[in-house]
Amino acid sequence: MVTKAAIDRFVEGRTLAMVGVSARGKGFGHAAYKELKQRGYRVLPVHPAAATIQGDPCWRTLAELPEQVDRVLVMVEPRAAEQVVREAAAAGARQVWLQQGAESAAAIRFCEENGLELVHGHCILMFAEPTGSFHRVHRWIWNLLGKVPKA
C-alpha cells in the first residue's frame, strides 16, 4: 500500500535517477525529465543506448551512475520494470517510484519483498514541488476521488 509518507519522502529528495527517459526526445518520460529539472531536481538519466539526454550526460545502467542514488524513478514498460527494480536494489537504491503505466505485479512484489520503499499508481509530477497548475488540479481531483493517500 502506498502511503503519503512514502510519496513525501521520495519527492523531498532532490536527486534521483530516472530510467525510461526517451533518447528520441519524445513521450512522457522526456517531458517529465525536463519538468523535474525545471522544478529544481537533479535527475540522472539512465538509458541503455543514449550518451546524452537533453544535452546532459546519460548512463547505460544504474550500476554505472557516478554516485549511489537512493531514489529511482521508473518510466519503462511494465514488462521491463522488474529488471529495473532489481538493478535499483543492486545499486543501493532505497526508494522506487513506478510511474503510472510502468507497474507490474512482479516489480511491486520484488520491491515489497526486498524492503524497497515503493510508490506506484501515481504521477510524480502531481507531487514534486513546485507543482504546476495542471498537476495541482489533477492532484486536487484525485483527492476528491479518494485516490491520494492520506496517511
Image: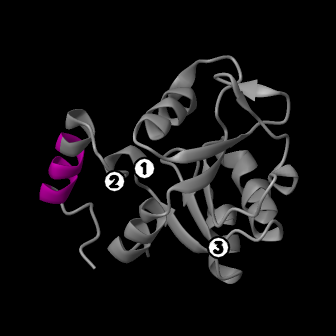
Q: Percent from the top left, x then y, of residue 140? A: 16, 50
Q: Is residue 65 above or below residue 69?
A: above
Q: Percent from the top left, x then y, of residue 131? A: 28, 44
Q: Name the side, left or right, on which 32 lies relative to 89.
A: left
Query: Which residue is drawn at the image coordinates 44% and 44% (left, top)?
Result: 40
Screen quadrant of the N terminus: bottom left
User: How far apart, in angstroms, are the residues tagged by discs 2 and 3?
Assistant: 19 Å
Q: Give the camera-side residue of 80 and 36.
A: 36
Residue to which mark 3 is pinned: 94
Circle 1: residue type: Ile
Say whether marks 1 and 2 touch (CB < 8 Å): yes
Residue to which mark 2 is pinned: 127
Looking at this rendering, what residue extends furthest in the left direction?
144
| Residue stretch rendered in magenta on the structure | 137-144
User: How far apart, in angstroms, are the residues tagged by discs 1 and 3?
Assistant: 17 Å
Q: Percent from the top left, x then y, of residue 98? A: 56, 55
Q: Percent from the top left, x then y, of residue 103? A: 58, 54
Answer few, some or many: residues within 10 Å of disc 1's Cα (few below 14, many 20 plus, some between 14 and 19): many
Q: Is residue 109 magenta?
A: no
Say whether marks 1 and 3 touch (CB < 8 Å): no
- Magenta segment, prevailing SS (helix, strand or loop): helix
Residue to which mark 1 is pinned: 124
Circle 3: residue type: Arg
